[in-house]
Image (cartoon, rainbow, N blue to C red):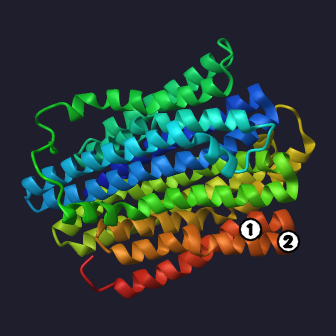
Amino acid sequence: MKTGKMMGEFAKYTSMSVLGMVAISCYILADTFFVSKSLGTNGLAALNLAIPIYNFIHGTGLMLGMGGATRFTISKSCGDRKGADEMFTHTVWMGVLFSLLFAAVGIFASEPITALLGADRDIFEMSNIYLKVLLLFAPAFVFNDILLCFVRNDGNPQLAMAATVCGSFSNIVLDYVFMFPLGMGIFGAVLATGMAPAIGIAVMAPHWLRKEKGFHAVRTSLQGELVKVNLSLGFPSLLAQLSSGVVMIVFNAIILRIAGNTGVAAYGVIANIALVVVSIHTGIAQGIQPLVSREYGKNDGQAARRFLRYAMVSMLALSAAIYLGIFCFADPIARIFNSEGNEELQRIAVTGLKLYFTSVAFVGYNLILSTYFTSVERALPAHLTSLLRGLLLIVPLAFLMSAAWGMMGVWLTFPVTELLTAVLGAWLDRKGEGKRP
């Protein structure tokens, strides 16, 4: 394939994917902004304690969508239409099962989970409301993620992007309407967030309802092998989101001990901006996934590696711009979410922004490389890098570094973890060169 055509495909898929992922990340960022304006520091703390559950739901949707869509693309590239349809059908059934599980947790277990997350008397009710409603909307989040992946991999990245942008824009508008003119408080914030993916699904209807689409639900019994393939290929996507939730829970517990609710509110500012920053890199990674999987299905390793190089160069350029912007504008960024003018919150957040986001290039490298491993069915290195950055390194480092250096140690835990993981990822990638991609 000619270089110009490859670069055009790369630009098309990644730009659409980045815009879509940024729009999804704005679901929670919009909540953070309006909650900070309406409910102040306690509202921010309550929201931040509940957000990890969003990571679990979104991670499940991405796991099913990325795993299913990866196998779908490979099967379609090999001319196996039946296998492609069976993979889509299995993904839908697993989406139903996980959605019912999340909804049941929301109905029967939201209060004990809220207590487990560390909500005190001042913020318990707000955290519980946000958590319960979020879980009840889990089916919309899960199926929005699944359909986004399949629609994008079925050659329609523009519609996938349009769906996420429309959902995000509606969330922003509804956040304002529900929280200010209607005065619905934190319930209004989470209601707006829950409605956004449902709107996204509706926007994608012209594709997933038409008969000419590349994926169809077919009559088939659940096959253990297909379930295993879906979960194996999608697990790194789940782990990336799952680890974000676990890290937030751990960081919240540590910060509550060091700086109380104000510290948690400051971390909420950083964590929500991190959602947007990470979504940019995730968008690049997901943008190359169908292209790399297609070339892998054709047994063209050189083309697959070229798409990986395009992604890495783009990521490095964006990372430099992102960190420069955060470093130079850390103070005004923090003030956007500091409606009460809390000077302690401002000080903690500004320092955190400058230290935490030194990780930005390492995060991008790890996310793109992990997705590349998944796209070429190298599940083991994808799982290993995801586990290291998500759980095995960051959790013990958080306790050790916070004990040694307090809040500075908390902020530096993330970049240190991502750097160590990037070194291992580079070694695994180099070790795998020369083999079929």
Amino acid carrying mark 1 in the image:
Leu
Amino acid carrying mark 2 in the image:
Trp
Between residues 78 and 1, which one lies in front from this camera angle? 78
**Mark identifier at residue 412:** 1
Residue 175 lies in quadrant:
top right
Q: Earlier in the sequence, mark 1 or mark 2?
A: 2
For numbered disc 2, what is the local secondary structure? helix
| Residue 381 coordinates in the image, percent (x, y) | 40, 77
| Residue 433 coordinates in the image, percent (x, y) | 34, 84
Count all numbered tags in the image, as a single digit: 2
Between residues 136 and 281, which one lies in front from this camera angle? 136
Residue at 86%, 59% in the rendered image:
258
In the image, residue 359 above or below residue 180? below
Tell me, yes or no, if residue 338 can be seen here. Answer: no
**Mark identifier at residue 207:** none
Between residues 8 and 86, which one lies in front from this camera angle? 86
Callout 2: 10 Å neighbours few (<14), some, many (20+)?
few
In the image, residue 338 above or below residue 418? above
Between residues 99 and 349, which one lies in front from this camera angle? 99
Q: Which residue is mark 2?
A: 405
Q: Quick check: 415 left or right of 201?
A: right
Badges 1 and 2: C-beta atoms under 8 Å apart? yes
Residue at 61%, 47% in the rendered image:
113
